[in-house]
Image (cartoon, helix red, strand yellow):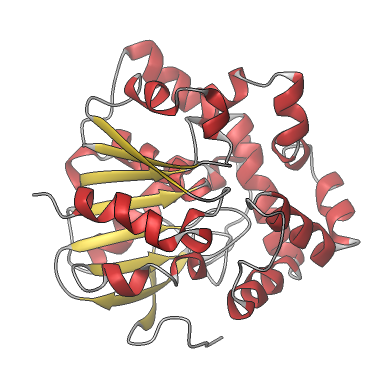
Amino acid sequence: MTDDLFPGFTEGRAAGAGTEIYFRIGGSGPPLVLLHGYPQCNATWHRIAPTLAKHFTCVLPDLRGYGQSGIPADEAEHRSYSKRRMAEDVVALMQGLGHRTFRLVGHDRGARVSYRLAFDHPAAVERLAIIEVVPTLIMWEAFSSEMALKAYHWPFLAQPTPLPERLIASHAEYYLDHTLASWTRDKSLKVFDPRALALYRSAYGDPDRLHAFCEDYRAGATCDRADDEAERAAGRKIAAPLHFVWGQAGFPAKTGDPLGIWRDWAENVTGSSTDSGHFGPEEDPDGTLQGLLPFLLQD
């Protein structure tokens, strides 16, 4: 599949940790990895990647199961879609491209992969930026009645197969469009480029990818949560400098102290906000870049 969302970028496929990873690459300079979230693919970066590519060699993978990357078979305890395994994909991809260290930016599920990578492979991560999430364990522990209504997809997608897959597949495009619009500041699809939206919708038409999305959330409810619990019990913190970007109308903003949460998980935390809902890179690309660039450009 081709599109013109990323002029000047090239496409590639490479081995991850047991599955093929599709990626886009462009720009020059130090390596920078950008990891997308649910229910999207690497197209989510199309409004900020051209600017970042003026300073960095930008590598934009599709997470396993998403976009055009491989769809691994299920494993016990949903481990094949754990953030630990997804992080291993990224490390393998970057080593194959000749990069043992890199800067890292993650949004949504990609942010969960990013902070897991920083825990498991600390020598690889020079700087870490997290967009719009708090740690998985904290999210589950914060599930009040209000949170359950706003983030219902967490327990819904984590239900045993094939319940969520079958229910979503009956009206897949409606479900996707509703989800995307409901997480924006303006509750509208207008913010999304039609070419990007077409890619998001295409993936939702594939039953195998739909199953992979659910497995991602099943891993979040089980092994990912357990991995976070192990870090907290051991008193470990992320060593890399961490910059947290949250939307003023997004989920973390409602916690009242989003930076305080991350200071419990990382040694050196800074932050900035965007005039957006959940999708800062698409809703407010200028605001996203204003927070990211000064942080990423530091040595």
Say which of 194 and 26 sits in front: 194
Q: Residue at x 71, y 71 (%)?
A: 201
| Location of residue 1 by image quarter | bottom right
In the figure, is residue 29 to the left or right of 122?
left
Q: How many marks?
A: 0
Question: Relative to residue 57, is residue 109 depicted above or below?
Answer: above
Residue with the most extreme left position: 299
Question: Relative to residue 13, is residue 75 depicted above or below?
Answer: above
Q: Position of residue 256 (x, y in %)?
A: 51, 23
Say which of 230 and 138 sits in front: 138
Q: Residue at x 38, y 79 (%)?
A: 12
Say which of 267 and 72 sits in front: 267
Question: Relative to residue 82, is residue 269 depicted above or below?
Answer: above
Q: Position of residue 49 (x, y in %)?
A: 35, 70
Q: Residue at x 39, y 11 (%)?
A: 233
In the figure, is residue 96 to the left or right of 3?
left
In the figure, is residue 247 to the left or right of 195?
left
Q: Position of residue 135 (x, y in %)?
A: 47, 30
Q: Position of residue 19 (x, y in %)?
A: 47, 62
Q: Residue at x 38, y 87 (%)?
A: 7
| Location of residue 31 by image quarter | bottom left
